[in-house]
Image (spheres, grey):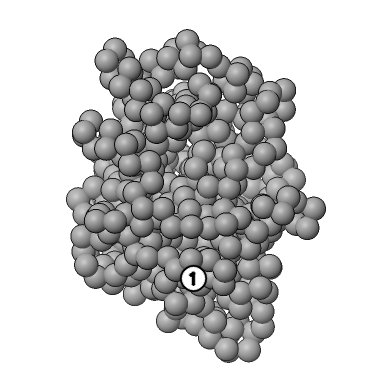
Amino acid sequence: MGPSGNGRMPAPSEDCLYLNIWTPAADRKRRPVMFYNHGGGYMIGSGSATGQDGTRLAQLHDVVVVESNHRLGLLGYLFLGDLADGDYAANQGMLDILAALRWTSDNIDNFGGDPDNIMVWGESGGGAKTAAVYTMPKAARLFHKASIESAAPLRFPIRDGATARAERTLHLLGLARNDIPKLSDIPAARLLEIQVSEAANGVAPWGDPDPLPGFGAFVDGGVTPRHPFDDGAPPWSGGKPLMVGTCRDETVFFSLFGPPDVFRMDEAGLRSRLSGTYQGAELDRIIATFRRSRPEATPAQLYFAITTSPIWRDAITIAEAKAAQHAAPVFMYQLAYQDPTVVPGTGFPLGSPHASDIPMKFANVGADQLPGKRATARHMSALWAGFAHHGHPSARGVPRWPAYTPKDRATMWIDADCRIAYDPDREERLFWQRRA
C-alpha cells in the first residue's frame, strides 16, 4: 500500500511478527476464536488494516478475533534451499502464520478464547493462505474449521518453480549462486523494487503460472506437501468443516483503478477484451451461454460475469472435493448484495466486487450506509460467527443453510434478504464442466 500504508494500515516493516487480538473480555470464558489471514496476494496487507478491525465482530457475536502479521512477497517466499547449502527454509511466510497459530493455540485462553475451537479464515490472498493452512499437516491440530473466501486455489506452484523464481531474482540482482550469502547485505528496499517490477509484469502469486510463479505458498514437500484441492481435499483436514465462496462480481474490483472505458463497453468491446483468453467458436459459446443465463446484462456486466466465473468454478471444485470425503460438511455462498454506488465517470453500479465482503464479515458497515448494505453486513457477520461457534453457519432471520452436496448444490445467497439457491447459474457451471 506504499510507504505510508495509504491511510489504511501501518507502514511496512521487516519487524513484522506481531499479532492483534480483539476480545470481549480476558475472562477465560473460552469463546470461539476467529483467526483471520489478511488478503493482498501474498504481497501487501496487514493484520492491522482498518477495514478488518475486529472490534465489532467480537462485541456483537461474543468471539475472539486474532489477526497476524507475517512476512510477505520476496521476504516471505524466496526459496534458496535447492540453490545453496545451509538453513534456507521454504514457505517462510506460511511458517510465520503457523507460528502465530501455534501461539494462539497455546495462549488464547488468557484472552477469553477457546483453544479447542479455532476457525481459520481469510479473503483473497488470505483465502489462499487459509487453503495452505488447510494443507499443512503441522497445522492440523491447531485449528478446527476454515473458510476460504474469494480465492479458489486448487494448485500451488511446485518446488522447481519456486527455485526458478529464486534464480530469476538472483539474476535481476546481478548475483550468482555463490553470491547468495550477500543477499542479507542488500537493503530491503532494493529487494522490494525487484518484487514490484516482477508483479508489474503480471506475475501471479499462485496457481501454475507460465513461465514462472510469483512469491507465495508453494508445494515444497514438507511445510506444504501437496496441492490444496487438485487431487481431492487434504486427508488430515478431513474432519474440519469448511466454508467456501465468492462475491458475485469479483473482477469489477480490478478495473476500478484504471480508465473507466471497461464499464462502458459495447458488444465489440466485449468480444475484443475476451479474445485474449477465448477464440473463435469458444468465444461465441461462452458469450452465448452467459447471455442466456443473464439476459438483462449489459456487455460490461457480461464481461465481469465471465471473468469472475472461473473463481466460482474452482470454488465449486473445492466444495466437491470436500464433500467427497464424507467426513465434515462444506458450505457454499455467494455475496450477492448489489451496491448501487456508481463507478465514478460511468453509470455502472458497483454490485458486489472483490473485497466488498470484508467490512460485511467484520460488521464494519456504519449507520450512514444504505439499509440493504447494513442488513447484509448484519447477516454475513452473524453467519460467520455462527460457523465459529457451532461449525454450522447460522444466524437469526436467515434461512437454515444446508451443507453443499453435488446432488442439490445448496448455496447461501447473501443479501439484505438471504435465501438458499440450488445450483445457481447452472448453465454457466455446465459450460465449464463441458470445457474441462
Location of mark 1 (residue): 394
Q: Is residue 75 left or right of residue 378?
A: left
Residue 396 visible in this rendered orientation of the protein: yes
What crowding class fits label 1: few (fewer than 14 Cα within 10 Å), some (14-19), or many (20 or more)?
Answer: many
Question: Which residue is drawn at the image coordinates 41% and 73% (left, top)?
Answer: 391
Considering depth in this image, is 281 or 116 the residue closer to the camera? 281
Q: Is residue 433 left or right of residue 371?
A: left
109 to 253, vertically: above or below:
below
In which quadrant of the rendered image does the C terminus lie? top left
* Residue 210 location, quadrant: top left
Name the residue furthest top: 268
Q: Please state the horizontal and vertical placement of residue 338, each as a whole percent of the image.
A: 60, 43
Question: Which residue is drawn at the image coordinates 32% and 60% (left, top)?
Answer: 404
Q: Please state the horizontal and vertical placement of residue 110, each as a whole percent of the image.
A: 58, 85
In which quadrant of the rendered image does the N terminus lie? top right
Question: Which residue is drawn at the image coordinates 40% and 36% (left, top)?
Answer: 309
Q: Please state the horizontal and vertical placement of residue 313, each as a whole percent of the image.
A: 34, 41
* Residue 181 location, quadrant: top left
- Give the structural element (helix, strand or loop) at label 1: loop
356 to 243, vertically: above or below:
above
The amino acid sitting under disc 1 is Ser
Name the residue furthest bottom: 28
Q: Please state the horizontal and vertical placement of residue 62, each as a whole percent of the image.
A: 61, 78
* Residue 141 location, quadrant: bottom left
Considering depth in this image, is 86 or 409 the residue closer to the camera? 409
